Image: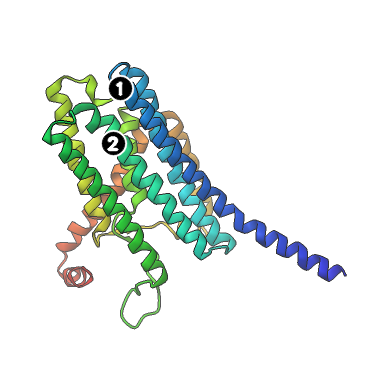
Amino acid sequence: MENEENKHVHKGIKKGLYLIPTAFTAANIGMGFLAILSSVRGFQIVAASPEQAAIYFDYAAKAIGLAILFDTLDGRLARMTKTSTELGVQLDSLADALTFGIAPVVLAYTWGIGAVFEESTSVHKVGLFVLFIYLMCGVLRLARFNIQATRPRVLREGTPKVDKKNFVGLPIPPAAGLIAAIIHFIPMPLNIYNTGLARFYGTILMVLLPVLGLLMVSTIRYTSFKNLGTGRNNLYLILILGTFGMLVWLYSHYVLLILAGLYVSHGLIWYVATLFRPRKRAEVEASS
């Protein structure tokens, strides 16, 4: 009897563990939902009260930032508790499409493109097109990631070791994080500036969006940090995370923007630097 009761208890605990990653995925979806609502609410008053609209845009940017944290934790918890499931993988991708695809597109439009360019102008139509390009590239990036997760690429031909240290292409959460970090740094909508300056900033935004989209569907390698915290240097990791958390609390506008910019650019910089290495150039061309 005692053995049967223990088995039931262990089964109950195991089933409960499956809910933990799903709960963080649900929190990710919730942040995306709040980000979209806050962006829409800000756009409703962007002309009448830019200061109040900036508060809503900042809420949306913070929600996307929190969603990145939840998205990171749900994957790590699933690996730690060995509760990864096919349903969880698909649910995570759908959550990412909402929170890091649709939500940043809505935020970028309401904060910048829609606030500056009138709907009747051709520039506004170009803005809608580049937003669609970002969204499509993000969805394609998620689809490719799912395929690679089921059929992972080996590091070298004939070697069974899987490349877990790098992502192929810019992941969609950091791409959305850069957009959110920029708006968190300057939450005031672009329509507060004079017409020339506002259109200049809006044009920069329209250039940034397709660049992020192309990086997502590229073959440039980005560090995954999946092995971070799995070795013997967990103490140093705790110190780093504690320091980072304090810096974010005190100087979030600067720290998050710098961090997002460094991550998005480091893969491109490393790729360009690798091209100038004679020994590595052939490998890079072959992998591309």
Relative side of 242 to 252, left or right = right
Q: Which residue extends farthest bottom?
A: 158
Q: Is residue 91 left or right of residue 14?
A: left
Tell me whether the residue at label 2 lies in contact with that at label 1, contact meaning CB atoms closer than 8 angstroms: no
Q: Residue furthest right?
A: 1
Q: Residue at x 15, y 28 (%)?
A: 199
The residue closer to the viewer here, 185 or 247, is 185
Q: Residue visible at 34% across and 18% down?
A: 51
User: Considering depth in this image, is 92 or 275 the residue closer to the camera?
Assistant: 92
| Residue type at the position of mark 1 | Val
Between residues 44 and 199, which one lies in front from this camera angle? Answer: 44
CA separation in Å, label 2 and label 1: 13 Å
Quarter-of-image position of residue 215: bottom left
Residue in the picture at 24% in, 43% down = 131
Residue at label 2?
A: 108
Q: Relative to 34, is 41 above or below?
A: above
The mark found on residue 46 in the picture is 1
Q: Check disc 2: other Cα within 10 Å, few if <14, some if 14-19, many if 20+.
A: many
- Residue 211 at least partly seen: yes
From the viewer's perspective, tell me whether residue 93 is left or right of residue 5: left
Q: Residue at x 47, y 34 (%)?
A: 246
Q: Compared to 119, does 33 lie above or below? A: below
